[in-house]
Amino acid sequence: MSDFLFQIKSVGDVIRLVDHIGFLSFFENHIPGFSVEECCPRELWFAERVDGPWEWKGPIVFHA
C-alpha cells in the first residue's frame, strides 16, 4: 500500500467512501490511488480465514 488519500481495511470503509464520493474503482487505473486495490493492505487480499476486498464485492453491491 502506498501513500494514497484513503486507507481501506474493511467493507465498511469502502461503503462509506463510495457513499461520500459516489464511486471507486476496484482495480488500479489511470488515476493514481483511486482504487480499492491500491488503498487496501496486501495482506487482506485472498487471506485465509479473513474476508478481504474480493469477498467485500457482494455486500458493497447489495448496499447500493
Image (tube, rainbow, N blue to C red):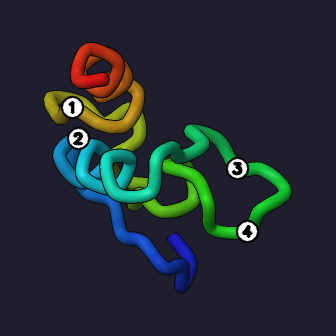
CA neighbours of label 2 inside 10 A, class few (<14), some (14 to 19), many (20+)? some
Marker disc for residue 11: 2
Q: Is residue 4 above or below residue 45?
A: below
Q: Is residue 47 left or right of residue 3?
A: left
CA neighbours of label 3 inside 10 A, class few (<14), some (14 to 19), many (20+)? some
As shown in the figure, which amino acid type bears the numbered disc 1? Asp
- Residue shown at the point (58%, 52%) measured from the top left: 35
Q: Are marks 4 and 3 in contact (CB under 8 Å)?
A: no
As shown in the figure, which amino acid type bears the numbered disc 3? Glu
Q: CA distance from mark 2 to mark 3?
A: 18 Å
Instruction: Point out the tag, 1 or 4, that comes first from the N-terminus.
Output: 4
Q: CA distance from mark 4 to mark 2?
A: 21 Å
Q: CA distance from mark 1 to mark 3?
A: 20 Å
The residue that disc 3 covers is 28
As shown in the figure, which amino acid type bears the numbered disc 4? Pro
Q: Secondary structure at mark 1?
A: loop
CA neighbours of label 1 inside 10 A, class few (<14), some (14 to 19), many (20+)? some
Examine the image and state in which quarter residue 42 appears.
Answer: bottom left
Q: CA distance from mark 4 to mark 3?
A: 7 Å
The residue that disc 4 covers is 32
Q: Are marks 2 and 3 in contact (CB under 8 Å)?
A: no
Q: Residue furthest bottom?
A: 3
Instruction: Point out the tag, 4 or 2, that comes first from the N-terminus.
Output: 2
Instruction: Point out the tag, 2 or 3, that comes first from the N-terminus.
Output: 2
Instruction: Point out the tag, 2 or 1, that comes first from the N-terminus.
Output: 2
Examine the image and state in which quarter residue 4 appears.
Answer: bottom right
Q: CA distance from mark 2 to mark 1?
A: 9 Å
Q: Are marks 2 and 1 in contact (CB under 8 Å)?
A: yes
Nearest the viewer among 46 and 21 is 21
User: x, y (%) of residue 50?
Assistant: 17, 35
Nearest the viewer among 60 and 49 is 60
As shown in the figure, which amino acid type bears the numbered disc 2? Val
